[in-house]
Structure formats: structure tokens, C-alpha cells
């Protein structure tokens, strides 16, 4: 791709480094920005800069937040004793869109994947165990993706949590095997939460 401006080329390289964006798409985005007013570009640049300086992780659940405690954890109407364990924040957004869950969350930050070198110590599992030890949960919902890695992580968490006196459930299999939660339609995901079932280790062992 022959670009006559070094500055444009640098910006294209930055956009193209984002997942799902090729260089042609990156160039189209940059050319669109060139047509914008200077005030718009300044606002865009400011918002981009705020990603690191203004956004943090909720110290309770790991959700993205503008404050120390996220907007979900501070809601008095939430049942703080029901914790839904998810892989990342996209899953929180998907579940919230169903308007069927009224507990709180815990973001693991990934799933166990030996092929990618990700083990239990790389995830936010210790903080989840601490929440349970501190009596913060009556029920843990394992809402991880229906994949081999998700099931492996579910099994690991179940073994860690089974020593405590609490209910451990998982989404009903209205969510198809191999499907990521944030790609599941809201109706199906909502029903899977409402109709959640006790966690069963047998399917994982098989």
C-alpha cells in the first residue's frame, strides 16, 4: 500500500493493529478522520487517551469502571449474594442486555488454555475464592463459554468452590456448545440464566 504521507501511514498501522481491522479498513477510517472537523478530532483523541488514564477495573468484580466500584456493584437493588462468573466484560454486557440477571459479577479475565499457556494463576481466581471465603456468595453461576476451555475452567472452579457451603450452578444448554456468550441472542441467553441448573462435572469428564 503506497501512502504519500508518513503520518497517515503511521495512523493506518495503529488502526490495523486492532483485531479484525485490515489495512484497507484502517486506511478508510483514517481518511474519514481527515474529513472531520478539528474539534471532533480533539474529542476523539481525548477519549482515546482516557482509556488508560480514566478507566479502571472495579476492585470488587473486575468490570470496567470510571470509579473504584463499578455501577453494577453499587446498585442497592442487586443481590450481592449471587455472583455470576464470566470470562470478560463483553459477557457482562451481553448478560445485562437480557435484563434477566439481578446479581453481581466476577470477571476472570480469560479461561484456562494450556495450548496458549494460560493457567489458573493467570486468571482472577484467587480473588473469587476470597469473595466466597468472606461470605459474599450464596450462589456462584459459572457462565463461561460452552467450549472445551470454558468447560475445563468450570471444572477447575467447581473443585475449588465445592469445599464451601454454597450453590454452584451453570447456564442451561440453551446456549449452543462452542458459542461465545456475547454472540448469543438476548432471548436465548436470558432463558439460559433464568433456567440455570446445578453444575454437573460428568459432561466435562467425558
Image: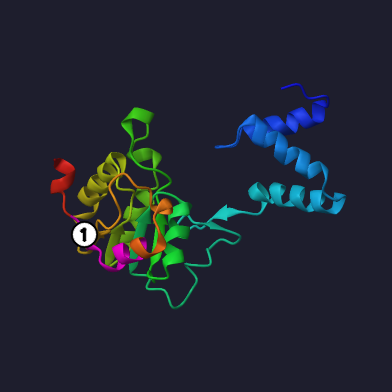
| Quadrant location, the C terminus | top left
Give the tally of numbered discs. 1
* Rendered position, 180 above or below 131: above
Image side of residue 191 versus residue 56, left or right = left
Image side of residue 197 versus residue 67, left or right = left
- Give 114 or 80, whichever is nearer the viewer: 114
Q: Position of residue 39 (x, y in %)?
A: 85, 53
Q: Position of residue 40 (x, y in %)?
A: 81, 53
Who's the residue at 53% across and 67% down the image? 71
- Give 142 or 39, whichever is nearer the viewer: 39
Who's the residue at 32% across and 31% down the image? 114
Report which residue position mark 1 lands on. 164
Extreme-bottom residue of the structure: 77
Taking the magenta stretch, the answer to whether it contains residue 196 is: yes
| Quadrant location, the N terminus | top right
Q: Position of residue 106 (x, y in %)?
A: 40, 57
Q: Which residues are magenta?
A: 189-199
Extreme-right residue of the structure: 38
Examine the rendering and report whether any part of residue 68 can be seen. yes
Q: Position of residue 32 (x, y in %)?
A: 76, 43
- Please identify the quarter of the rendering in which residue 186 is found: bottom left
Who's the residue at 74% across and 33% down the image? 11
Amino acid at each position: 500500500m503506497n501512502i504519500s504521507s508518513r503520518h497517515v501511514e503511521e495512523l493506518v498501522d495503529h488502526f490495523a493493529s486492532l483485531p479484525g481491522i485490515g489495512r484497507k479498513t484502517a486506511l478508510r477510517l483514517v481518511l474519514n478522520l481527515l474529513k472531520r472537523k478539528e474539534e471532533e478530532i480533539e474529542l476523539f483523541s481525548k477519549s482515546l487517551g482516557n482509556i488508560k488514564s480514566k478507566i479502571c477495573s472495579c476492585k470488587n468484580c473486575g468490570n470496567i469502571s470510571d470509579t473504584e466500584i463499578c455501577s453494577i456493584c453499587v446498585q442497592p437493588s442487586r443481590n450481592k449474594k449471587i455472583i455470576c462468573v464470566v470470562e470478560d466484560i463483553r459477557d457482562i454486557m451481553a448478560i445485562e442486555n437480557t435484563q434477566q440477571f439481578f446479581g453481581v459479577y466476577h470477571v476472570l479475565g480469560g479461561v484456562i488454555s494450556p495450548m496458549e499457556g494460560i493457567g489458573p494463576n493467570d486468571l482472577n481466581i484467587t480473588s473469587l475464592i476470597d469473595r466466597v471465603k468472606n461470605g459474599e456468595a450464596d450462589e456462584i453461576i459459572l457462565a463461561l463459554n460452552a467450549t472445551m476451555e470454558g468447560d475445563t475452567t468450570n471444572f477447575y472452579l467447581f473443585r475449588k468452590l465445592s469445599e464451601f457451603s454454597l450453590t454452584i450452578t451453570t447456564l442451561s444448554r440453551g446456549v449452543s456448545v462452542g458459542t461465545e456468550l456475547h454472540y448469543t441472542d438476548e432471548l436465548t441467553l436470558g432463558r439460559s440464566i433464568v433456567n440455570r441448573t446445578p453444575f454437573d462435572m460428568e459432561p466435562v469428564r467425558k
